[in-house]
Image (tube, rainbow, N blue to C red):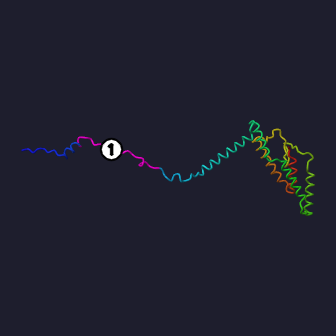
Amino acid sequence: MVAKKRNTLRGKVAARLGSKPLDIPTITPTVDDELSEDPKAFLHQYKESKKEKQMNKQSAFISKIKQSSKNEFSGISKSSIRRRKRKLRDNLKPRMEDLLTSLKQELDLKEFTTESPNKEDIMTDESTISLLASNRPSSVTRIVDSKKPLEPGSIKIKKNEPNIRNKKGARALSIKESKRFIQVLKTDEFKKNSFAALRDIIKLQKH
């Protein structure tokens, strides 16, 4: 005799679950799962770096200079601005007339000093002044022949003299004056009385 198949409730539930697909619930990320911002981020004060400070100062200084230059040369053409700047540069250059005036002031100060000089110093100063007066030429400039050797302090007149307004000419003139000044320093007159010798040599210069 064959036994009957018994269908229990447990078997029915298992058969029903096996026939249907399992519904797995999908998990959606909530706001709490996301990374939250640092709560102490707004508590720290912003600090400017050294490089940023330097760049800000530089830009502020440049803008200030540009603004002042615009206000100074407003309504003036570019050519006149260039002429004014060139004139200011020329005024800054040293001149031989300024040296002559300073030497005269130095001699005046020496005359009005409170200290009484010695008799020997007075005799030597008078002798050097008399020697310079005897050797002093009658004219202001001495015209020297190109074939003869140049004496210290003399000037050779040329038609094509370098222009002091040009960069190349100013450099050539400065080299020439420095060589002439070295020659003057080697003379006996300069060793005896330096200020008087310099004054005489400046007077001999062609203006």
Please tell me whether mark 1 sits on a helix, a strand or a loop.
loop
Q: Which residue is drawn at 74% across and 38% down?
A: 74
Of all residues shown, which one is farthest toward the left? 1
Instruction: Give the quadrant of the N terminus.
Output: top left
Q: Does the magenta stretch include residue 92?
A: no
Viewer-proximal residue among 20 and 193? 20
Residue name at image x 73 percent, y 41 percent: 71
**Residue 75 position (above or below residue 108):** above
Q: Residue at (16%, 44%) from the top-left corner?
A: 7
Residue 20 or residue 119, whichever sits in front:
20
Look at label 1 and name its amino acid: Pro
Report x, y in % for residue 181: 81, 50
Expressed as whole percent of the image width and height from the top left, the position of residue 125 reads 91, 58
State which quarter of the image contains the C terminus: top right
Across the whole image, how many numbered discs are drawn on residues?
1
Q: Is the magenta stretch mostly helix, strand or loop?
A: loop
Q: Where is residue 100 in the image (x, y as percent from the top left)?
A: 86, 50
Q: Is residue 35 magenta?
A: yes
Nearer to me, 49 or 83: 49
Q: In this view, does 30 lie to the left or right of 78?
A: left
The quadrant where residue 19 appears? top left
Residue for badge 1: 25
Mark 1 closeness class: few <14, some 14–19, many ≥20 residues within 10 Å: few
Q: How far across and how far down the image is residue 123, in percent?
A: 93, 60
Closer to the camera in the image, 10 or 120: 10
* Magenta stretch bounds: 17-36
